[in-house]
């Protein structure tokens, strides 16, 4: 298992990939949503989520700028990133047939919760380690993910109730 700066780089790489999936899902679902409330939820949160993605990518570049690793580990990093991107695209294609706003929103909430956990970890870990920028990224990203999850949970409950209406007699 990697440690030190290599561990941090791997976690930031993971966050860039995972959060990128979330941003892409919001973009796709904003365009695909049949329910205006879902479309508005995506539209409302996309600007901040794009900003978080930008911060993560910039921080990754900052961490990689000081790299004096061997060409072998550089190649391994590139392969790992390419594999992560390929996995992300494959997952996105596998999710493409989803036609229900309810199912799309449930999937988005899962991605948002993963992002929330990552940003909380960066905030608290950055504070404990004295890594100011990492803590700042967490402090900025975590509350926005909490807000998305709160709004999304309320909407998913409404979509569920609306979809299940009429089943009361069973």
Image (tube, grey):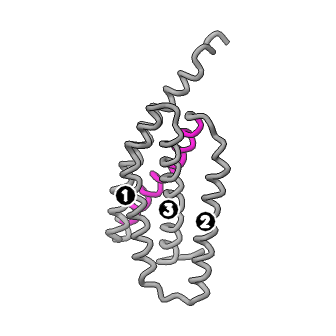
Task: Find the distance from the CA under tag 1 to the CA under tag 3.
Answer: 14 Å
Q: CA distance from mark 1 to mark 2?
A: 21 Å
- Picture coordinates of residue 60, whole percent (x, y): 44, 72
Q: Name the mark nearer the viewer: 2 or 3.
A: 2
Residue interval drawn in magenta: 103-126
Quadrant (top left, top right, bottom left, bottom right) of the C terminus: top right
Decide: few, some or many residues near mark 3? Use Cα within 10 Å; few <14, some 14-19, many ≥20: many
Mark 1, residue position: 51
Tally the numbered discs: 3
Residue 58 on image: x %, y %: 39, 70
Q: Bin the neighbour count of mark 2 within 10 Å (Cα to Cα): few under 14, some 14-19, many 20 and up.
A: some
The residue sitting at the top extreme is 169
Report the residue marked by disc 3. Answer: 15
At x 41%, y 49%, the residue is 46
1 or 3: mark nearer the eye: 1
- The residue nearer to you, when weighing 64 against 114, is 64
Neighbourhood count class around disc 1 (C-alpha, 10 Å): few under 14, some 14–19, many 20 upward: some
SS under mark 2 = helix
Q: Which residue is mark 2?
A: 84
């Amino acid at each position: 298992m990697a440690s030190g700066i290599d561990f941090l780089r791997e976690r930031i790489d993971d966050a860039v990939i995972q959060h990128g999936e979330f941003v892409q899902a919001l973009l796709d679902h904003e365009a695909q949503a049949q329910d205006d409330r879902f479309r508005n939820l995506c539209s409302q949160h996309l600007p901040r989520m794009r900003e978080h993605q930008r911060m993560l990518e910039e921080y990754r570049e900052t961490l990689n700028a000081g790299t004096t690793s061997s060409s072998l580990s550089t190649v391994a990093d590139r392969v790992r990133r390419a594999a992560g991107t390929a996995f992300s695209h494959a997952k996105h294609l596998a999710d493409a047939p989803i036609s229900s706003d309810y199912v799309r929103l449930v999937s988005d909430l899962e991605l948002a919760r993963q992002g929330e956990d990552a940003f909380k970890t960066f905030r608290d870990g950055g504070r404990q380690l004295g890594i100011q920028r990492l803590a700042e990224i967490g402090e900025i990203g975590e509350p926005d993910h909490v807000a998305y999850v709160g709004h999304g949970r309320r909407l998913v409950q409404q979509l569920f109730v609306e979809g299940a209406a009429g089943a009361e007699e069973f």
